[in-house]
Image (cartoon, helix red, strand yellow):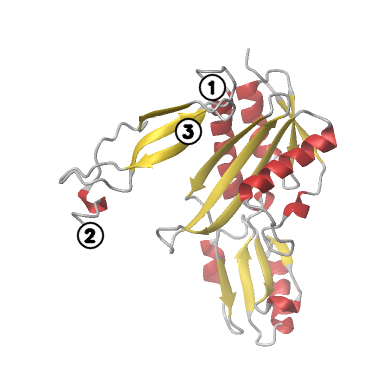
């Protein structure tokens, strides 16, 4: 029997994430999610009107504990994310998705994260005579909602969850009138219930978390054995120089601290010369 079979897990969300996570939790762990009506926006908002005071991991843990406090359950689950340019390729937008599972009975916190390339994260400034059409097509509007505000953010207007042409046109007109230069800031609404691409990312991460929770530590038997870090240094196929690509993976237990280094799961042993600092400086 799985460690969490038949248990209830508190999920703190205002944005419908149970639609992505309920089935992986039920099928993979035999557990059920209990949706908790808590104000997760108090920990920060994507649109910035409430700043996030802690990093994403600490915020995610705090969110899970809000749900546990509201429900009285000893098990909690929460999701958090951040979006921006890829650190090595600034023109490429990426998201860092996090899921944190908290088990108060075991004093255990298990985190699963992934750098998500599949995202529509974007923003643009619309000039007074500009056409938003090309940008809207790029970000998959109207299936994916957008946020509109004056380019001069201090003007105070903010319209979220826009997924209809009439409502969007009205919001743009009002923001143009409120901005001293008639310019409008458009951005993707990255909240899960407004963004099907992100909802799919959360589901994929939920499956990975379930797989981790189903895997006991080989040392102490606690749930949550999985990938913790990677070691760079994969050698170049031509000259043998160490590259920044992953050479090995560090797997471990967040409960007892056990660690094991093992080869890459894909079996790759060499790097392409195009990724070598000597062959391709």
Identity of the residue drawn at 59% across and 21% down? 222
Asked which secondary structure carries label 3, the reply is strand
- According to the picture, the residue beneath numbered tag 2 turns out to be 281
Identity of the residue drawn at 15% across and 46% down? 239
Residue 189 position within the rendered picture, expressed as x and y whole percent measured from the top left: 64, 59
Near-viewer residue (238 or 181): 238
Near-viewer residue (47 or 110): 110
- Compared to 5, does 92 lie above or below? below
The mark that comes first in sequence, 1 or 3, is: 1
The numbered disc on residue 69 is none
Q: Quadrant of the C terminus?
A: bottom left
Q: CA distance from mark 2 to mark 1?
A: 41 Å
Q: Residue furthest top?
A: 1
- According to the picture, the residue beneath numbered tag 3 turns out to be 227
Residue 126 position within the rendered picture, expressed as x and y whole percent measured from the top left: 59, 77
Q: CA distance from mark 1 to mark 3?
A: 11 Å
Q: Quadrant of the N terminus?
A: top right
- According to the picture, the residue beneath numbered tag 1 turns out to be 215
Q: CA distance from mark 2 to mark 3?
A: 31 Å
Identity of the residue drawn at 55% across and 63% down? 122
Near-viewer residue (47 or 198): 47
């Amino acid at each position: 029997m799985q460690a969490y079979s038949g248990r209830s897990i508190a999920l703190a969300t205002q944005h419908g994430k149970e639609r992505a996570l309920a089935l992986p939790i039920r099928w993979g762990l035999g557990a059920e999610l209990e949706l908790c009506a808590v104000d997760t926006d108090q920990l920060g908002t994507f649109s910035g009107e409430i700043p996030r005071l802690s990093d994403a991991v600490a915020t995610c843990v705090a969110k899970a504990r809000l749900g546990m406090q509201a429900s009285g359950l000893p098990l909690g689950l929460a999701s958090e994310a951040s979006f921006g340019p890829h650190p090595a390729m600034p023109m490429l937008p990426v998201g860092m998705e996090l899921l944190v599972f908290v088990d108060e009975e075991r004093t255990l916190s298990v985190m699963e994260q992934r750098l998500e390339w599949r995202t529509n994260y974007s923003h643009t400034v619309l000039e007074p005579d500009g056409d938003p059409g090309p940008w809207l097509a790029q970000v998959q509007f109207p299936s994916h909602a957008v946020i509109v505000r004056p380019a001069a953010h201090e003007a105070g207007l903010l319209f979220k969850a826009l997924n209809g042409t009439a409502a969007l046109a009205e919001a743009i007109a009002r923001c143009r009138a409120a901005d001293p230069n008639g310019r409008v800031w458009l951005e993707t609404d990255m909240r899960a219930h407004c963004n099907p691409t992100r909802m799919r990312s959360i589901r994929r991460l939920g499956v990975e978390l379930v797989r981790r929770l189903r895997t006991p530590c080989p040392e102490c038997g606690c749930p949550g054995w999985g990938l913790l870090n990677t070691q760079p240094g994969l050698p170049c196929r031509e000259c043998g120089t160490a590259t920044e690509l992953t050479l090995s993976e560090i797997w471990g237990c967040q409960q007892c601290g056990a660690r094991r280094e093992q080869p890459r799961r894909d079996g790759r042993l060499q790097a392409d010369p195009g990724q070598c600092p000597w062959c391709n400086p």
